[in-house]
Amino acid sequence: MIEVKDLTKIYHMGSVEVPALQGISFSLERGEVVAIMGQSGSGKSTLMNILGYLDLPSSGEYLLEGRSIAGMSDDELATIRNQKIGFIFQQFNLLRV
């Protein structure tokens, strides 16, 4: 289960704060199918990066199966991405070998 409570993400560009997410809250049950839709610049990719453990929120709480993302080490985040989370990127994100 995914639970998101009052999630915000603010990017800092010099002295300017750019809010990407403002107070997002929802929950999803295992097996539930949803679509995240919105106009360009509405925060869809930012939300997906947070849900995919690729980025951290500025504030709020993200729980995956009751476990908070806050305070996890890079190794813990990588393990969860390996075992629990997966999505297909819109762009090609291939690793060089």
Image (cartoon, rainbow, N blue to C red):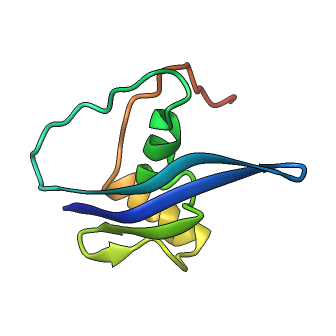
- Please provide percent x and percent y for residue 4: 33, 62
Figure quadrant of residue 57? bottom right
Q: Is residue 65 above or below residue 50?
A: below
Q: In this view, does 28 lie above or below 74?
A: above
- Please provide percent x and percent y for residue 70: 50, 76
Direction bottom: furthest residue: 71
- Please provide percent x and percent y for residue 41: 56, 28
Total numbered badges shown on the rendered structure = 0
Quadrant of the drawing holding the N terminus: bottom left
Quadrant of the drawing holding the C terminus: top right
76 or 71: which is nearer to us? 71
User: Which residue: 69% across, 28% down?
Assistant: 96
User: Which residue: 33% across, 69% down?
Assistant: 63
Classify residue 14 as left or right of residue 35. right
83 or 85: which is nearer to us? 85
Direction right: furthest residue: 14
81 or 15: which is nearer to us? 15
Figure quadrant of residue 9? bottom right
56 or 52: which is nearer to us? 56
Classify residue 73 as left or right of residue 3. right
Q: Is residue 80 above or below residue 76?
A: above
User: Which residue: 49% across, 71% down?
Assistant: 76
